[in-house]
Amino acid sequence: MPPFDTIVVGLGGMGSAAAAHLASRGQRVLGVEQFQAAHDRGSSHGKSRVIRLAYFEHPAYVPLLRRAYELWRRLETDTGRRLLQITGGLMIGAPDCDVVSGSLRSAREHGLAHELLDAAEIHRRFPPFTPRQETVAFYESEAGSLFPEEAIRAHLDVAAAHGAHLHFDERVEGWRVTATGTVEVTTSHSQYEAGRLVLAPGSWASALFKVDELPLVVEPQVLYWLEPSGGAAAYAADRFPIYIWDLGDGVQFYGFPADQDGRVKVAFFRSLQKDEAAIRVALAPCLPSLAAGRLVETVSCKYTLTPDHHFVIGSHPDHEQVVIASPCSGHGYKFASVVGEILADLAIDGATHHPIDLFSPTRFRPR
Ligand SMILES: Cc1cc2nc3c(=O)[nH]c(=O)nc-3n(C[C@H](O)[C@H](O)[C@H](O)COP(=O)(O)OP(=O)(O)OC[C@H]3O[C@@H](n4cnc5c(N)ncnc54)[C@H](O)[C@@H]3O)c2cc1C
């Protein structure tokens, strides 16, 4: 019998969650991470991530989100770490834009509580927003922020508490399936053998997955922190929600309430526009006090995009012992808790009851 049941490669958002779920189900787990825990060179740093239940990208995500919320809350209780800040969330734009109409569709399909606000009501409830008259917003009280670095540490705490071996500053150079059906992993330090392999390498996926016709594009995205002109009081988390604003022509930006230091984070969503001037131009008609704010920090973070912007999660098409995960396309973090559960299901049982058909690793192959 190999010394480990499962090796998890990459201990970022998804790998840390997989290690936690596997170890807490009694698996002998080795986790290997090329950098330190909760580092800032991948896709899971920058202090906050949007979490929301109504899902404009596709209603099929909603059952996963229900479970993700449940697991995040359980993780908070189990570790004593604060991971969620529920503030409510606005999806803003023209009534027929994807962000508004897609959120409504998923809310109606899954019976999710929501309100539809007109421009005057948006401004009345949340004064920093100055929408044009024809703008509307889908409001959901369950939405908020998730703290990704804390969440990674929480998952690693759980994994370690259940006996997982967690190796940092160790790079996986390659892997192969042996003649006896086990998996051998070669790292910068050593070689390890296990019954199963979970690959959760984030933006390094193309180098490790070894799956043909799985086009993954890595794109740096910039996060901006501004101090609003006139102060951050109106942006405090007890009165200001997370939001995604669809300006049309493929331009969307999103943002968060002020942090403890009065800094307000904002970024483009899957946009090729990346400079400070462009974000100020986008903000000017929508959040003028933020557009005029002082820039205090910028951070770059990597998206790993699929052509349809849905995730990649499943068993490796050529090796049943190997499970691959690239749940990104700029919207994966909120799912990390349930993705950990799914990856553990796939590694242990070869199947999961969660709906993951949308995420098939072979869907881009010609039919
Ligand atoms: C700017 C930005 C904003 C985002 N906003 C949101 C949001 O608001 N809401 C949301 O839900 N999602 C959001 N996302 C998406 C979300 O953050 C990602 O889906 C998620 O972080 C992906 O996690 P991961 O585990 O795949 O990648 P990572 O967390 O990067 O983990 C991969 C890990 O694998 C390690 N690794 C790679 N190769 C090797 C190797 N050879 N050997 C050892 N270790 C290796 C890496 O070092 C890394 O730690 C955003 C992403 C970005 C970049």
Image: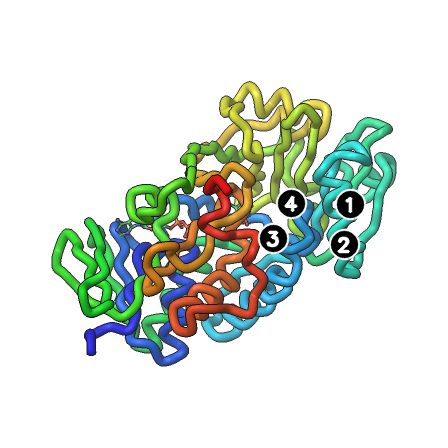
Amino acid type of the residue that numbered disc 3 sits on in the rendered structure: Ile
Tag 2–tag 1 contact (CB < 8 Å): yes
Q: Tell me the number on the disc at residue 57.
A: 4
Amino acid type of the residue that numbered disc 2 sits on in the rendered structure: Ala
Which of disc 4 and disc 2 is earlier in sequence? 4
Q: Secondary structure at mark 4?
A: loop
Q: Nearer the viewer, mark 4 or mark 3?
A: 4
Amino acid type of the residue that numbered disc 1 sits on in the rendered structure: Phe
Q: Is residue 171 above or below residue 80?
A: above
What residue lies at 43% left-to-right and 49% top-to-bottom? 326
Which of disc 1 and disc 3 is earlier in sequence? 3
207 vs 325, left or right, is left
Asked if one can make out residue 133 in the rendered structure from this viewpoint, the answer is yes
Q: CA distance from mark 2 to mark 4?
A: 12 Å
Identify the image quadrant of residue 299.
Answer: top left
Which of disc 1 and disc 2 is earlier in sequence? 2
Which of disc 3 and disc 2 is earlier in sequence? 3
